[in-house]
Amino acid sequence: MNQTISVWTVLVVAIVAANLPFLTERILLVGPQRAPRKAFGWRLVELVVLGAATLGIGFVLEGSIGQRAPQGWEFYWAFGFLFTTLAFPGFVWRYLRRQ
């Protein structure tokens, strides 16, 4: 797999993973379905777990291309803010649209 395909794969995975907590009432897609609505806290937990999974996929793909570069705290903060920004369409769809 070349570098371009790896980058686009991580971006697509990040976009899907960031919006997934807002599109379903199940906990992590496999847990029990919440009767009326899933609490916002569960959605935040899912966002963190899926963000970590996206980072893991990115690290694996980076390692398959070559040597993995060391990352400082700035990288993780930037990733967190980017992941939160990518989750905005799902948040709007779930909480801000008219019913």
Image: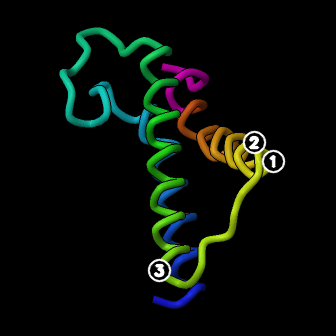
Label 2 or label 3, whichever comes before in sequence order: 3
Rendering coords of residue 62 (x, y %): 55, 74
Color theme of the render:
rainbow
Residue position for label 2: 77
Dots 2 and 1: beta carbons under 8 Å?
Answer: yes
Rendering coords of residue 57 (x, y %): 45, 61
Q: Residue furthest bottom?
A: 2
Graded by Cα atoms within 10 Å as few (under 14), some (14 to 19) or many (20 or more), the crowding at tag 3 reads some
Nearest to the observer: residue 40 or residue 10: 10
Measure the C-alpha gap from mark 2 to mark 1.
5 Å
- Secondary structure at badge 2 equals helix
Residue position for label 1: 74
Name which residue lies at 59% across and 79% down: 67
Rendering coords of residue 86 (x, y %): 63, 47
Residue position for label 3: 64
The segment highlighted magenta reads 93-99
Measure the C-alpha gap from mark 3 to mark 1.
23 Å
Measure the C-alpha gap from mark 2 to mark 3.
24 Å
Graded by Cα atoms within 10 Å as few (under 14), some (14 to 19) or many (20 or more), the crowding at tag 2 reads few
